[in-house]
Structure formats: C-alpha cells, structure tokens
Amino acid sequence: MGHALNKILKDIINRYNVLLGHRVHYIPGWDCHGLPIENKALKAARVDDHRVIAPTEVRSLANATAVQAVKSQKEEFRELGIMADWDSTASTYRTLDHDYEVRQLRIFQKMVEKNLIYRHYRPVHYSPSSRSALAEAELVYKDDHVSHSVYVAFDLDLQSNEFSGQLSVWTTTPWTLTANMGIAVHPDMTYALIRRAGATNETAGAIFVAFERLEALSKTLGKAEVIGLIPGSELVGARYHPLFSSLATDVASKSLALIASTHVTSDSGTGLVHYYNLFRTRNLISVDSSIVCHVGEGGLFTSEVVHIVASLDAGSRTIVGLLKSMGRLLGIERFKHRYPYDWKTDKPVIVTATSQWFADLDGIKENALKALENVMFYPQISRNRLESFIKSRSEWCISRQRIWGVPIPSLHHIPTDKAYLDARTLDYILAVLDEKGVAYWWEGPIDEFLPPFLRKDDEDLSNWRKGTDTMDVWFDSGSSWSLLPERQDDQPRADVCLEGSDQHRGWFQSQLLTAIGTAETDKKSMAPYGTLLTHGMVLDAGGKKMSKSLGNVMSPMAIVKGGVDNKQPAYGADTLRLWAATVEYWRDMAISPKILDQASESLRKIRNSARFMLGNIGDPATREESSLIPKNQLGLVSLDTFKLVSTLTNFTNITLSSLYFDITKDSLSTVTVFQHVLNTLIKIIAPVLPHLAEEIHSAHHGQLISEISYGPSVFTKPWVSLSPDWYDMVAEQEMAQLLQVRSTVLGLLEQARGRRQLSSSTEAEVDIILPSVGHPLSSLIARETWVHVDSVQLPDSNERMSIRLRPATLAKCPRCWTYTRSHDDVLCPRCTDVLSASV
C-alpha cells in the first residue's frame, strides 16, 4: 500500500507540472537485487539455503523472479494511472540491467580511487536470518526484547594474584562466553569480597562484586557476608581463567587479565563486565590480541564448539546447562532491554567478527552535511532526521554475504590472505565485466580477472580466488542519480526526490553519500537532489502497521478491481488516488473500507457536478450556435479555483451543488459560468483524478466513451489560469451580504418544516421588511430574482430588517416547480418568456 501511495504522490506532482507546460523528466526504476528477491526465488525453487546450489543457478532464479516482479508492478502502475514511458528502456531502469550495473561499479571505482573503500576483520552487526552483515542503517531497535541474563563465576588465577576468590560476571548474551577475551572493572568503583551463606571455609564461596550492587543482588546471590573491600584500580591486572579451556585458542589458553573501563556502571549487573570480540574496536583489548569468534555464518557456532551447541537459539540454553553442570551458574533471570533487529526480517541480530568491506564516511560527511544546506525539506523536521543519521555514522558496511547482487570485484591471494581492490585492478576487471556481463564474475575462471602485474611467474592459479561478497542494495539504489545528466548553474541533477520516512536511513543517505564520495574535490559540494519530500507510513483503521501476520494488509489492486471473494467492492483507481491526495501525506495515515467509502462518495459528487454542468452547456454543436455573455454583463460572483483537494470537494459539494446549481436555472449567463468552471475544474482534478478528467474532457469535446483513448488528452494543453478580470470584489461583497440573508431564511424554513407546515422550500414566500428606503441592501435584494430572505442587522447601520415567512399565495409552475404561477395561467411568467424566446 505504501508503494502505491508513493507512486501516486509522484504522479500528482508530475501531472501538475505537465499541465503548467513544464517538461518533466521522470525515470521510474526498480531495485532488483537483495535478500527479499533472492529468498523469494529460493523459496519458489524449494531451496532453504543458497549455499547448496551453484551461484549461477541462484542468480538465474533470482533474475527470473525480479523480471517477473517488474512486469507485474509495471501493469499495476498503469492501472493506477501513473504516467510514464513504461515501454522504453531509456526512460525506465532496473538495477539488474547491464548498463546500470557497470555504471554502479564505476562509481564504486571512483570511491576506491579516493581511498574511501577498505576491508577490515572486525565486529559487525550480523543477521542470522539474512545470513549477511548489516549496516547500522539497516537496523531497528526494539525496547521490548527479552534476553536470559546469567550471573557466572570465573576463577581467579591463584598463581598470578595475591588474593583468591571468584569473579561474579553478568551477561545478557550467554552464547558469547565461549569467546570471552576479558573482564572489565571500573577503576573508581569499590568492590566487595563476599562469602555466600553455606560456605565451608573462608575462601570457599568468596565472590567479588561491586559494593554498590550488593542490595540489588541479594535476591540472586542470597545471603552473604562482606569479607573485605578493594578499590577497582587494584583489581585491574589481576588474572583469571577462561570458562571453556577446552575451546581455548592461543589467546584464551592463557589466563586473562582484568581490564579497566569507564563503560562499567553500577546501574545493573555485578560491576564486572564480560567482554568478547566487540570490544577490541574500543581499545579495551590490546592490539596484539587476536579476535576470538566462535559464531560463523547463519548464526551457527564454528567447528570449534559445534560439538557443544548448534545454533544461537539452542546455544544460549545449552550454555546455561553447561554452566549449571560446571557449578559456575550463580543465577539466571529474564531481562527486557533495547536490542537491534534486522529491519527486513524483523529478527534479532548478533555482533560477531567477520571480514567486511567498508566505506569511510568520516572523510565525506562534512561535505555531505554542507550540501544539504541547499536542499529543501518537506516537512522541515525531516532535515533534522537525515542530518542526525549522517552525523552519527563514521563508516558504511557495504558488503553482503549473498549471491544476488552486484559483486565487489576483489581478488584474494590465499597464501597471504591479502585482498586486492584498487583502481588499477578494477580497470582490468571492469573491462572484462563490461564486455561479458557482470554475471560473468561468478561464471568466468580466475585467470580472466587476474591482471598480469599481480601474478608472479609460473604462480599456481589455485593461490587466487575471486571475492564472493555483493554490494549493499543501498549502494545499488544510491547510484541512481547518475542516470540524470549534470546541469548548469549549480542545479542538482534531480529537482525532487519523494520517498517514505524510512528512506532517511536508506535511499536519501546512499544517494547523497555516493554523489559526494565521487565528486571532484575542487567543486562545490552538491546534493544530487534539490528537494526531499517525505511521506509517512500507511496504517490500518486502528493505527496499526500493516502486516500479513496481523491480516490487516490491503492490496491496491484489490481496492481498484475489487476483492477476489467479492466482499470488497471495486473502487477504481481514482478513488485510491483521491484518498492519497486528501491525507496529510507527511504523517502516518490510515486506510480502511470506511475511509475508501468516504473517498468514493466524494468522487461521485465531483463527477455528478461535472455531469450537471455538461448537461446544461450542451454539446459542441449547440455551444457553437450560442453566444457567450461577456463577463461584465453577468452580474454574478466569479468562482475561483482551489489548491487543496479538500477545498475542491467542498467547492463541488457545497458551493456548486448545494448553492449555485440550486439558485440558477434557465440562464444563458449560467451556461457561460459553467463552461469556465468546467474547464478549470478539469485542470484542477486532472493531476489527482486523471481517469475522471479524461472522461469529462472527452465528453466536453463531443467524444464517445469508446473514443476517449484515441482523442486528445487533457494534458496536451497547459493549464491557463482565469483572467484577473474574473475577480470582482464588489460581487464578492454583495454575495456575502446576500448569503447572510439566505442563511437566516433557511433557518426559518427549517422551523416551518420541523412543524410540518411545509414540505418544500418552494411552498413558501418570503417577505423582507426594510426599516428604511434607500439602504444599499434594499436595492441589492430588489435586483436579484431569487430572493429568499426573523431579523437581520443591516450593514453599516444600527437598524435591523424584519423577515416574515408565510404560505405561498401563487400556484406551482409545472415547468420550474416554483410557486410563481397565477392560478389562471399555464406557466409562470418567467418560463413563459423563456419558451417564447426559443420559438
């Protein structure tokens, strides 16, 4: 539903600019790579893991899935009335197209040349559900995540320390204990050595915990006696034994040291924090230490510990069982806390050490922020959101461990475990890919990609391998700005980018960062877009996010064509478009059958107003025989156009249908006004309701319904605003006075109708009694033929006029149904004159 909203809002902007006579360069496109497409393809092939089949087969399946999805969406966009050159490959794009992929790789090459791309083996957010590393922008944080935290006892190394006992450590990630690389204490905190109740001697059961946490830990550790106190600074450097010595690497096989860290707090836990691979990046573990990581792809433990547990879900439970059997488990409890989730799969992620490619953002984010100064934001608050995202990032993890995507064309020397990715090797590799297709990276032999300057004489080709990582899909979509040509006079390539609010972490960022990252250093920093429009998310009637699991998803095509079970009516595309145009798009918005019914009713009233005017102005031949009355002879208030759709709906329902259509009959001046109103109304509704606008436009020009597709479109002629001559302040003031009188009369009529003294307003006559002769309102009322006018304050006077309502004294005219016919006549004088003039 959000996709349909996005396309409709873009189309309204495009169509409006076409009506203004502007040339619109709109290139719709599809992001075809990434995990959702790959998973969908594998699911259709009944394959659970992409590693069990050849990469070329995975890509073939994913390519077919993506192409079919593009074809289906293209037809849906046509159904929604989205205006674009859908059949032209030059006016649309797919990120799987060869030209697009090569262009993207060239952008990547420029960033490599500027030393913005590098590779590191470091802790990253890893999604077991996606089997891939994730960037920070791909995470959502949930405050209600529940973990099982454990309190664990580590033994101090008696040979290395002057004191003995155990260290009480608290962790919310038991599965990381196999990779323990250190325990941290706060040097300024005081620690207590306590002996738990039931200990047989002074040293048995002696545990170190933060003194400030004693009261909070009483439920977990039970009754305990404080043996002594020690500053945290004296604990720093003390050595302890890792829990799983049988799993120990060269690092963990030795006793490990307690380290100092100000990250440790007395707000939770025991005051002693278990550190694993993550904290090397925070300089808490010496640089010469190796990273210990026992979690591999898919969230599975590596072969070093696979004989103990199989996966993280089972791992935490099994680790807890092991701790119990080892006598190291001091306590366990459920813990609700904030935790990162994969935004695509809605599953929790882990932090694990893997080798990944990164883009350095520290070197370009200042220029990116400077470039945003010249960008307009709607709503304005979205500027703060995008800027805060960019300010908070120092690097962008651009590598993904998937098959379906644009490859990161790196070469790896297996004996030295060195990766080669520089401008020179990329020149050589991209020449091959440009000629044979980017997919050839997975199909071609290594010797075709290995430059002669890298390979030593007679070196075995088996010493080399191609990189298997693909680029983050945000790098794919973030390269789309390159499709538009550069413009002069410091103009951005794109005037407008319109996307959902979730794209502050995605497309808005990636476009900006890739554009700035490839820009010439001597040029002014410029964003690829001039204006950013952000729309909210579509919710159900209860304000809940739409999801298949909740069963509250509404399909745009079901709204347009009707549900398959006939329980949902076919509203048509214009009803959905009208809904999209009437909501406050910058906020989250609701949609439901009731809301669609309201939009459908508004559309029906707009259409009926147009039908009424078309019926009164006649066909083109009749209009040619009639001469239109000049505006200065009409004596009527001009009907202005309105910008907002809600105002347009009010205008057609109230101003036209309930007022103007009701008070004007059989007047040539009315036909003149109708033509001007209709011409303007068509232009106003055309960007929002193109199907209805084309139908009215065709009927107005005498075309049959079957000929609409072949006649000139309403968009072939620009929207010309009404002449200023149509704005008449005198007429506006006079109408305001008359409508005030009319409002009082209508109130009296309702009183009479409520007492069942009349059934129709035409059954009554209205007497207006003025306090004096010569007041301007007196001549104004006398001038109007439709006067329906209790007590009303006279303008610019202290006097009031009286209004008397009484039964009509004349008979009902069979033609106009007004009570103005003499009992002896067939028609009223007005109708008699009209018929006489037409003979």
Image (spheres, rainbow, N blue to C red):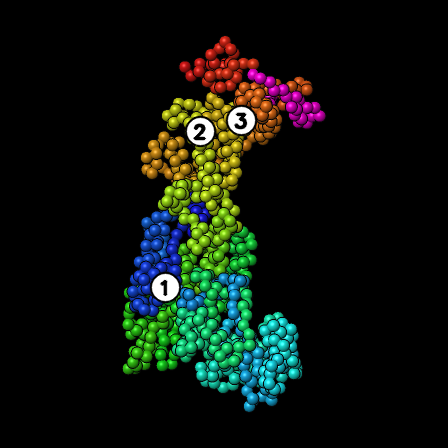
640 vs 550, nearest the viewer: 550
Q: Residue furthest top?
A: 824
Residue 217 spot, x, y in % from top left: 61, 73
User: Circle 3 sits on which residue?
Assistant: 636
Crowd band around label 2 with a 10 angstrom C-alpha radius: few (<14), some (14–19), many (20+): some
Which label number is shown at residue 612? 2
**Quarter of the C terminus within the rendering:** top left
- Tell me which numbered mark, 3 or 2, is placed earlier along the sequence: 2
Q: CA–CA distance between discs 1 and 2?
A: 56 Å
Name the element at disc 1. loop
- Tell me which numbered mark, 1 or 2, is placed earlier along the sequence: 1
Residue positioned 43% across, 23% down in the render: 627
Q: Residue furthest bottom?
A: 159
User: Circle 1 sits on which residue?
Assistant: 405
Q: How many marks?
A: 3
Q: Amino acid at mark 3?
A: Leu
Residue positioned 42% across, 57% down in the render: 481
Q: Residue furthest right?
A: 798
For residue 748, say whether it is visible.
yes
- Tell me which numbered mark, 1 or 3, is placed earlier along the sequence: 1
Is the C-beta separation of discs 1 and 2 under 8 Å?
no
Give the residues drawn in magenta, as a range: 779-808
For residue 631, say whether it is visible.
no
Crowd band around label 1 with a 10 angstrom C-alpha radius: few (<14), some (14–19), many (20+): many
Crowd band around label 3 with a 10 angstrom C-alpha radius: few (<14), some (14–19), many (20+): some
